Amino acid sequence: MDFIRYAERAAALVNADLHDEEALREHLADRSWLHRSVVAADVESVRAFQTDLRPVFEASDVDDVALVVSSLNDLLADHPVTPMISDHDPDNLHMHVANKAASVAELLIGEALMGLANLVCDLGATRLGTCSEPRCDHVYVDTSPNQSRRYCSDRCSSRANVAAFRARRRAELVRDDQPGRAAAR
């Protein structure tokens, strides 16, 4: 199991707009083998899980370690994970988080919970966050060496930097237009 990838998929799952089965299939674009198994109940289960999982990212963003841990433990209790060794490639035995009979929702929820639980144990409970760009409500996983991530994407980081630059520029122009300021130059 690649727990970092599962944790990043958990953030992508929270950020996804899953309004119907087709939207869930689009979310699973890189996992086409799951497409034919998607049913309406998966959409409803995953949407409920999105609502339950978002507070974990929000708690991590404000360094509330106890709430991150208790929330993940509650979700793990509500959604038991059944890890199994996969032998579909005998030369590459690896773990899956759900058995073959699991629904798409159970698989996605299991991956998300195992990824986040392992990330929290390995890197710490403050490695999850919510985007600092005021117009964005997405979440992210911070695997940077110095835990410096503040935005969900390069796009949001650029938008915030441009907005800050423009605000500084406006402030300079206002300051320069004040009476007596020009004469002092």
Image (spheres, rainbow, N blue to C red):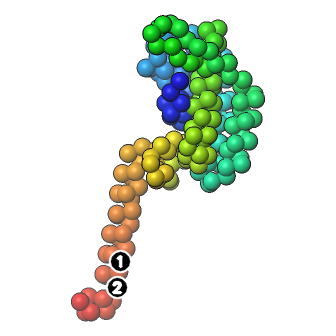
Residue drawn at (25%, 92%), measured in percent from left and top?
183
Residue 16 in view in this figure: no
Task: Provide residue 37's location: percent of width, then percent of height.
Answer: 57, 9
Indicate left or right for 49 with 182 as reference.
right
Task: Provide residue 15's location: percent of width, then percent of height.
Answer: 53, 36
Label 2 secondary element: loop
56 vs 102: above or below: below
Q: Amino acid at mark 2?
A: Gln
Front-most of residues 171 and 37: 37
Task: Provide residue 14's location: percent of width, then percent of height.
Answer: 57, 35
Q: Amino acid at mark 1?
A: Val
Residue 134 in view in this figure: yes
Examine the image and state in which quarter residue 56 appears.
Answer: top right
Residue marked by disc 1 = 174
Alpha carbon distance from label 1 to label 2: 7 Å
Front-most of residues 155 and 183: 155
140 vs 22: above or below: below
135 vs 52: above or below: below
Image quadrant for the C terminus? bottom left
Residue marked by disc 2 = 178
Estimate how packed mark 2 is, as few (under 14), some (14 to 19) or many (20 or more) residues with alpha carbons within 10 Å.
Answer: few
Task: Provide residue 109's location: percent of width, then percent of height.
Answer: 63, 25
Residue drawn at (50%, 33%), measured in percent from left and top?
4
Contact check, label 1 and label 2, Cβ < 8 Å = yes
Label 1 secondary element: helix
